[in-house]
């Protein structure tokens, strides 16, 4: 109860703090403002045996020139990842590279990214955003998967529709997806609201992926889900090449990342960077109040 009150207090006070102070907190969860800073973090993570996916912070771009500029930065990232021999792929939000502008814009920019992924023998993840564009995101994924197999998307366990979405995609063959709980504010008509029920649905969807040999990124910081995932992997005898565990950069995991590696399981760290770090940090804090608890501990240590 006390921790919850403190978390809410930190959430309310953080937007009032100077950006320099917020950065002292956010710097643990964001890899800097520039591509070079992010590439340095990616190298450090690779040296520790972690795989990486990199994301440029931002969403809902409303100018075609800006969407093109962001796309070009992703293209340069692919080149640098290839040149430096890094084990890293790319995650991109559709609204960040043109979906809010037009279908022509998003198709053009995704085409460029796909061609670059193909040319550098890399992978592209199309991130999922709010339920307003779930249908469009799935359509984009299906369209572009026909052009290049090394592409994946994301599904959110809190959405009522996700089980049907997975089954519909599976009818067209196996695929690759990241399974997360979901962070966008959605109504109860669209999304499950209670943690226990979300966790239960998460595990149900994970079992569907395992039983149907669908490659899945188990993206969660929830220790209950991790324990149940381990049990399911053992029970179903799932080979380690059919899944990976995924976490956000900087989020403490109570030794689980090391445990994954010791078990021979792949671990991929989602590394965000960019000039929009401040807005990202405030949003993530509001979406996940538990992060406030980590911040509180950092402040006391300092």
Image: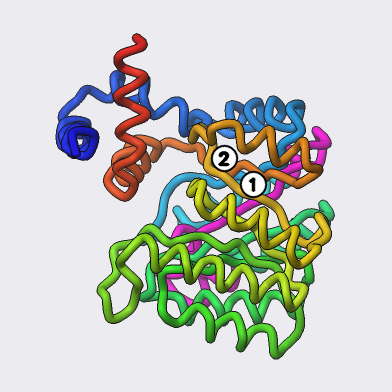
Is residue 227 in the magenta section?
A: no
The quarter of the rendered structure image containing the C terminus is: top left
The numbered mark at residue 271 is 2
The quarter of the rendered structure image containing the N terminus is: top left
Q: What residue lies at 75% left-to-right and 58% top-to-bottom?
A: 234
Query: Circle 1: is it few (<14), some (14-19), or many (20+) Cα within 10 Å?
Result: many
The numbered mark at residue 23 is none
Given residues 106 and 155, the one toward you in this image is 155
114 vs 223, left or right, is right
Residue 262 spot, x, y in % from top left: 77, 36
In the image, farthest residue toward the top: 302
231 vs 283, left or right, is right
Q: Tell whether label 1 touches label 2 (CB within 8 Å).
A: yes
Question: To which residue does mark 1 refer?
Answer: 53
Which region shows up in magenta?
79-108
Residue 132 spot, x, y in % from top left: 36, 75
């Amino acid at each position: 109860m006390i921790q919850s009150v403190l978390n809410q207090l930190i959430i309310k006070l953080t937007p009032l703090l100077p950006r320099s102070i917020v950065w002292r907190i956010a710097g643990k969860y964001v890899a800097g403002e520039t591509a070079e800073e992010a590439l340095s973090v990616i190298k450090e993570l690779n040296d520790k045996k972690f795989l990486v996916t990199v994301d440029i912070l931002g969403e809902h771009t409303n100018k075609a020139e800006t969407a093109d500029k962001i796309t070009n930065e992703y293209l340069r990232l692919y080149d640098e990842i290839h040149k430096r021999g890094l084990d890293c792929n790319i995650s991109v939000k559709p609204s960040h590279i043109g979906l809010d502008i037009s279908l022509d814009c998003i198709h053009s920019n995704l085409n460029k990214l796909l061609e670059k992924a193909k040319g550098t023998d890399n992978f592209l993840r199309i991130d999922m955003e709010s339920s307003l564009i779930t249908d469009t995101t799935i359509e984009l994924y299906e369209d572009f998967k026909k052009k290049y197999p090394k592409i994946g998307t994301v599904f959110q366990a809190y959405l009522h529709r996700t089980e049907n979405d997975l089954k519909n995609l599976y009818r067209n063959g196996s695929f690759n997806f990241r399974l997360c709980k979901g962070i966008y504010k959605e109504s109860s008509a669209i999304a499950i609201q209670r943690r226990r029920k979300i966790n239960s649905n998460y595990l149900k969807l994970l079992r569907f992926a395992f039983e149907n040999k669908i490659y899945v990124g188990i993206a969660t910081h929830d220790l209950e889900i991790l324990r149940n995932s381990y049990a399911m992997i053992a029970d179903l005898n799932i080979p380690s090449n059919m899944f990976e565990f995924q976490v956000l950069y900087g989020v403490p995991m109570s030794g689980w990342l090391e445990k994954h590696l010791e078990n021979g399981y792949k671990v991929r760290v989602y590394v965000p960077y960019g000039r929009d770090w401040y807005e990202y940090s405030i949003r993530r804090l509001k979406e996940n109040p538990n992060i406030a608890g980590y911040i509180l501990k950092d402040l006391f240590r300092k």
